[in-house]
Image (tube, rainbow, N blue to C red):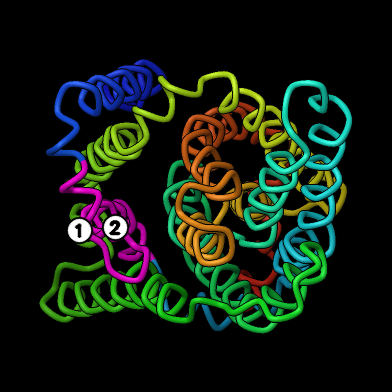
Amino acid sequence: MGLFEKYLSLWVALAIGAGVALGTAAPGMVQHVAKLEFASVNLVVAALIWVMIYPMMLKVVPRAVAKVGQRPKGLLLTLVINWLIKPFTMAGLAILFFKYVFAPFVSAEDAAHYIAGMILLGVAPCTAMVFVWSHLTKGDPAYTLVQVTVNDLVLVFAFAPIAGLLLGVTDLLVPWDTLVLSVGIFVVLPLAAGMLTRFLKLRHGGGEEGVDRIAARLKPFSIVGLLLTIVLLFSFQAETLLDKPLRVAMIATPLLVQGYGIFFIGYLAARLLKLEYKVAAPAALIGTSNFFELAVAVAISLFGLTSGAALATVVGVLIEVPVMLSLVAFANRTQHWFPARAEAVVVAAEQA
């Protein structure tokens, strides 16, 4: 284990502090970087996430992608968590906290906006950072790719109806430019680059060992990209964190309950289903992570840039990385709960 990975929690804490300090000391520069976006996707953050994802895409073997259908339980678990459980538990928790627990401290209008923002987060499963969390738990890259791809396909058809139902909005418009751009940047391009690199390395005699060596050399850049992403995300919202700490803390509370709760529902279900660890961990983490670019874009379009709904989606962005890293650490410590290679019989049969 490298120095970065061994003390990752420390580096993340320092990155959060550096982000808040940067946003406070140089707000003009940070605002300039924040404006470098297209279709609600910040291009600098997108580049850093791309750097994080690319090493994992090197490990995607086309044959393995085709064989995911032989092990459907992990994929079905992800779909059930993301579309039949997560949106509704998020709505329930948001209502519980802001209609009852925090009702004496916020106005009814603000509460309604916060609830709406959290609902949007709950209906938007992650596309980009899932690959990072899967990589950090040594997840099956081919299986993770299929899980993300299938969820994106469902997202196209299910996001607007479910979000509209929970928000009580009949004419909710999906920001297709954000959705298409995110899938292109975070799935299609890194996959194409990884497969091209793999093809060239195998063709010119490098073999699987050569591909692994490239991935190993790029791994430190992936961790640095993660830390720089944290610095930027917290610098973008430093003013909000310092000006509205109590509101941020109140919004973060149901989001934290939701995040950890959804993970453990998925993780324990994966254990009951006897999924192998490298499928179980990403399956649970996918349900926990959010497509925050999409949620933020819809919140702004429906309620406005300075609305409570937009603030709620931003708080979701801020807590996601620390929460996900804590769950990655938990998953890595408990991988002995799961069979290491549930597909061993399938592999042996193919080799026979």
Classify mark 1: residues with Cα within 10 Å, few (<14), some (14-19) or many (20+).
Answer: few
Mark-to-mark CA distance, 1 and 2: 6 Å
The local secondary structure at tag 1 comes to loop
- Tell me: residue 349, above or below residue 109: below
Q: Judge by depth and name the residue closer to the eye, 87 or 114.
A: 114
Residue depicted at x 64% and y 36%: 335
Q: Residue 130 placed where, x, y %? A: 50, 54
- Tell me: residue 290, above or below residue 221: below
Decide if residue 74 is on the left or right side of residue 2. right
Residue depicted at x 31% and y 38%: 236
Q: Residue 102 placed where, x, y %? A: 79, 25
Which numbered disc flags the more N-terminal residue, 1 or 2?
1
Tell me where residue 20 sits by quadrant: top left
Q: Which residue is mark 1?
A: 36
Decide if residue 235 is on the left or right side of residue 93. left
- Residue 50 part of the magenta-drawn span: yes
- Residue 245 part of the magenta-drawn span: no
- Tell me: residue 99, above or below residue 78: above
Stretch in magenta: 31-59
Decide if residue 194 is on the left or right side of residue 292. left
Tell me where residue 56 sits by quadrant: bottom left
Q: Which residue is mark 2?
A: 42
Q: Residue 173 placed where, x, y %? A: 59, 79
Answer whether residue 110 is visible to the viewer in this image: yes
Residue depicted at x 59% and y 52%: 282
